[in-house]
Image (spheres, rainbow, N blue to C red):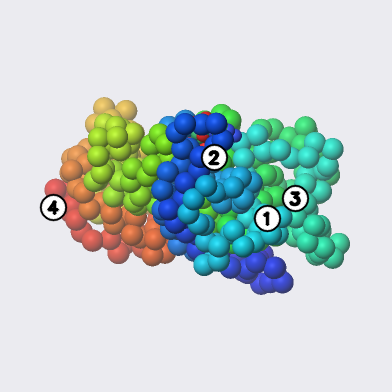
Amino acid sequence: MSAGSGSSGASPFPEAATLELVGVSKRYPGQREPAIEDLSLSVAAGEVCVLVGPSGSGKTTAMRLINRMIALSDGDILLGGRSVLGREPNELRREIGYVIQQIGLFPHHTVSENIATVPRMLGWEKSRIAARVRELLDLIGMNADEVGPRYPGQLSGGQRQRVGVARALAADPPLMLMDEPFGAIDPITRARLQDEFLRLQAQVGKTVVFVTHDIDEAIKMGDKIAILRQGGRLAQYAAPADLLTNPADEFVAEFVGADRALKRLGLSTLADVELTAAGGPMPGQGTIELAATVRDALSKVLASGGAPLTVLDEQGGAAGIVTLELLGSLLGDGELGDRAASDRKAGGEMLGDRAAGNGTTKAAGSAEQAA
Ligand code: ADP
Ligand code: MG
């Protein structure tokens, strides 16, 4: 897997794998209530499944069960159709990239040595390891010559998390487990890390289980979201747009928040909507990029006292105009989020690509209102 090409090949685990939890339960010794009870869900190969729920709802427990750091009380877990129970735990863990909040980089190893950990255990040739480390640092946007020889203590928190992601990806595992990976990072760096991971995932197409307690992060990162309640019981398992449109019960509705109509606008970009035609950028009119979410557009229009914005395409030309009326009509349009979600599933493309690729092919859902 080289960045985007998949050509450097000789990786031991080249495929993303399906993951199935079948009737999984976990009771810790001495605890009256189970931490997880009868949890079943399956994650398609190459999909990001976000586990979200309040503290203590069993998210971390679920991750540890998958890589066999702890033992199941009941049920089974299948990776690539094969029960993890029949696997040698150390071997299994080499096939599962694991990223946690306090990343646990080895402090006395350089960044390069940290990233090389699993390839070294797998006995890769030195030259192949060096090439892989370079490729991964490149993939996470870091300069290999500059950052590779540093020690973790010489990096910022955000940089350490990125190195943690690179280390987990090193042997190209078919499954990534990410337990609140960006939880301890400041909001701006965190948003950048999220964007970067989505871009990375569009290239590597791993099966990912991503844990968070933050519903906004779940909506942003997930192809599917599993909402857990206390006792590790599954409240709902659905695509973000479904969850926001049709919460299964009061618990889910409360968890996703009263602003779920607004959140749904965050799932679509301006490239997904039929804009009012524009002759060219209007002097004095505010601008926004085509790749911005509809929710961002609403915030910006409201901040400018309701004045329309010129939408700029990637070349800086005017793609159209977004007005408060148009945005208002989208708030009530349940199809918008569904459409964006199905685009994402079909194309596996990230926001920027979508803006460039099919911005002109969207159904003309709201053209009349906009005119
Ligand atoms: P989350 O990651 O969703 O916050 P956890 O999976 O860490 O939740 O914990 C789920 C429940 O299991 C909690 O009630 C927690 O106290 C309990 N628990 C977690 N680890 C252990 C352990 N090693 N021994 C006993 N109870 C545990
Ligand atoms: Mg946890």
Q: Which mark is residue 115?
A: 3
Q: Earlier in the sequence, mark 2 or mark 3?
A: 2
- Kindly tell me whether residue 139 is visible in this rendering: no
Residue appearing at x 33%, y 54% in the figure:
340
Q: Nearer the viewer, residue 51 or 162?
A: 51
At numbered mark 2, what does the secondary structure look like: helix, strand or loop?
helix
The mark closer to the camera, 4 or 3, is: 3
Label 3 amino acid? Ile
Disc 2 within 8 angstroms of ligand 2 (CB): yes
Label 2 amino acid? Thr
* Residue under label 2: 60
Residue appearing at x 65%, y 34% in the figure:
102
Q: State left or right for residue 282 relative to residue 330.
A: right
Q: State left or right for residue 103 relative to residue 184.
A: right
x, y percentage for residue 331? 22, 41
The mark closer to the camera, 2 or 3, is: 2
At numbered mark 4, what does the secondary structure look like: helix, strand or loop?
helix
Instruction: Measure the C-alpha gap from mark 2 to mark 4.
Output: 48 Å
Label 4 amino acid? Glu
Instruction: Measure the C-alpha gap from mark 4 to mark 1.
Output: 59 Å
Instruction: Measure the C-alpha gap from mark 1 to mark 2.
Output: 18 Å
* Residue under label 1: 89
* Residue under label 4: 368
Residue appearing at x 25%, y 44% in the figure:
248
x, y percentage for residue 108? 84, 38
Instruction: Measure the C-alpha gap from mark 3 to mark 1.
Output: 21 Å
Q: Quadrant of residue 15?
A: bottom right
Residue appearing at x 45%, y 33% in the figure:
33
Instruction: Measure the C-alpha gap from mark 4 to mark 3.
Output: 54 Å
Q: State left or right for residue 277 relative to residue 236.
A: left
